[in-house]
Image (cartoon, grey):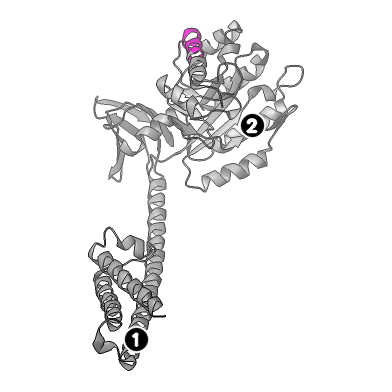
């Protein structure tokens, strides 16, 4: 029994030493004693409690050793006194910590509420900025086969007609076997189109050795450059099947972006598909207009900045190779719905450039009739949309302050090409 009491005394003493050192070296040890979920202003109290525990532990041990305390009555008194002190201190400490825990919860709740209010305020301010536009990316996969010329021609004409942009994901191994498609793609206005590399052949990359992936992407890139005079910066893995080795090879070969990387880290920027147009492929079936609208409206009400639509133009063809106008009309109606909102169509590469420079672009209001946008810190040129304030009347002017060139517009939404390093002023007369 006596030995058990001595062990208990030793435990109390060691606990006191730990508490004392935790208070003294609070930056190093206190985090192991006090939970992170509790905010503590001072750790001096730990030193005091530690000293009390050390004193009581040593007192009890001495009471069993020194002759003056050999009287059982004295020992019993010291034990009872020590137990009462320890109970009072322990319960007081527990109550004090619980109080601080409740205070921490209250402070955290208040701070989260304030943060949420600030985020909503900044989001509102951002949306009120006439340069603010969410970005829409349209991606058309499996380009290269002349058998699908009618659908490729349809989507290309639609882009020019509706003044939108599209990323065409091209299968290089198929492209080289279709010289007519090569000629057609070279005839397109590059202002509306980006050519992305859609693998080499239409086989997935996931799981292939790094060296093999590098060689395949290198050969695919060479085909794109030689046949289209175009250096691609976006890679679209066939069947969305890539891995970290895919992105490492892309990084080394000069690519900026990849699409639909799932569950893997990426050496390049990843853009994920938000709406896949097809619901199945054999035979092809499409989403309805309402399916798209519900999905797209959710995006509009979110804080997301980029929305990627992925489609395969060949799924808009009938079995005889002619366009299915019922299907194309639905898609065109969806494009019209997008254009009814204050949004900006971009290619994947343009989105990458904007995403890279976004926080380097400075905008502001000089006066009620003048705004500015400064691209001084940017790495890339940018297509810029300006949403004309409702109270502006008359002609609207854009002055490239850096070069001195001035242009006049009358549209509600003005689009112009901004050069990196330049300062622009937009104003009304």
Say which quadrant the N terminus sits in. Answer: bottom left
Residue 399 visible within the image: yes
Residue 167 picture location, percent across and down: 52, 24
The residue most toward the bottom is 73
* Residue shown at 41% from the left, 57% from the top: 116
Q: Quadrant of residue 198?
A: top right
Q: Quadrant of residue 67?
A: bottom left
Q: How many marks?
A: 2
* Residue shown at 66% from the left, 38% from the top: 289
Principal secondary structure, stretch drawn in magenta: helix
* Residue shown at 24% from the left, 89% from the top: 68
Residue to which mark 1 is pinned: 79
Q: Earlier in the sequence, mark 2 or mark 1?
A: 1
Q: Are marks 2 and 1 in contact (CB under 8 Å)?
A: no
Q: Is residue 200 above or below residue 20?
A: above
Q: Secondary structure at mark 2?
A: helix
Residue 65 picture location, percent across and down: 28, 81
Residue 42 visible within the image: no
The stretch drawn in magenta includes residue 43? no
Q: Is residue 33 above or below residue 255?
A: below
Work out how far the residue at label 2 is from the one at label 1, CA to CA, in angstroms: 85 Å
Q: Secondary structure at mark 1?
A: helix
The stretch drawn in magenta includes residue 225? yes
Residue 104 picture location, percent across and down: 37, 68
Say which quadrant the C terminus sits in. Answer: top left
Q: Is residue 376 above or below residue 30?
A: above
Which of these two is toward me, 361 or 340? 361
Please rate how many residues cluster around mark 2, counting C-alpha atoms within 10 Å: few if below 14, some from 14 to 19, many from 20.
some
2 or 1: mark nearer the eye: 1
> Which region is colored magenta?
219-229
Please rate how many residues cluster around mark 1, counting C-alpha atoms within 10 Å: few if below 14, some from 14 to 19, many from 20.
some
* Mark number, residue 331: 2
């Amino acid at each position: 029994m006596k030995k058990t009491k001595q062990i208990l005394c030793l435990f109390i003493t060691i606990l006191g030493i730990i508490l004392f050192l935790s208070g003294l070296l609070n930056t190093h040890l206190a985090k192991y004693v006090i939970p992170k979920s509790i905010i503590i202003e001072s750790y001096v109290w730990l030193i005091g409690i530690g000293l009390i525990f050390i004193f009581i532990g040593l007192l009890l041990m001495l009471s069993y050793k020194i002759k003056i305390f050999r009287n059982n009555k004295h020992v019993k008194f010291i034990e009872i006194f020590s137990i009462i002190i320890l109970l009072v201190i322990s319960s007081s400490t527990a109550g004090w910590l619980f109080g601080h825990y409740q205070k921490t919860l209250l402070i955290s709740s208040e701070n989260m509420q304030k943060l949420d209010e600030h985020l909503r305020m900044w989001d509102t301010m951002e949306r009120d900025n006439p340069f603010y536009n969410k970005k829409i990316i349209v991606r058309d996969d499996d380009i290269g086969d002349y058998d699908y010329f009618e659908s490729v021609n349809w989507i290309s004409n639609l882009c020019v007609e509706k003044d939108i942009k599209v990323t065409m994901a091209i299968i290089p191994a198929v492209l080289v076997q279709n010289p007519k498609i090569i000629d057609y793609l070279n005839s397109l206005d590059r202002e509306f189109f980006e050519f992305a590399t859609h693998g080499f052949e239409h086989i997935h990359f996931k799981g292939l050795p790094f060296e093999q992936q590098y060689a395949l992407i290198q050969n695919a890139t060479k085909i794109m450059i030689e046949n289209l005079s175009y250096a691609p910066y976006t890679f679209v893995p066939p069947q969305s099947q890539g891995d970290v080795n895919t992105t490492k090879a892309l990084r080394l070969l000069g690519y900026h972006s990849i699409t639909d990387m799932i569950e893997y880290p990426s050496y390049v920027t990843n853009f994920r598909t938000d709406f896949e147009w097809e619901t199945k492929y054999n035979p092809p079936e499409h989403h309805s207009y309402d399916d798209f609208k519900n999905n797209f409206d959710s995006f509009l009400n979110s804080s997301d900045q980029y929305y990627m639509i992925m489609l395969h133009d060949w799924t808009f063809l009938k079995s005889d190779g002619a366009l299915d106008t019922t299907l194309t009309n639905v898609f065109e109606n969806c494009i019209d719905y997008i254009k009814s909102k204050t949004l900006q169509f971009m290619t994947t590469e343009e989105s990458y450039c904007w995403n890279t420079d976004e926080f380097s672009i400075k905008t502001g209001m000089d006066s009620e009739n003048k705004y500015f946008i400064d691209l001084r810190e940017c790495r890339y040129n940018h297509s810029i949309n300006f949403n004309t304030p409702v109270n502006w009347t008359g002609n609207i002017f854009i002055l490239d302050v850096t070069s001195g060139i001035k242009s006049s517009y009358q549209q509600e939404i003005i689009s112009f090409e901004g050069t990196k390093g330049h300062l622009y002023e937009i104003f009304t007369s």
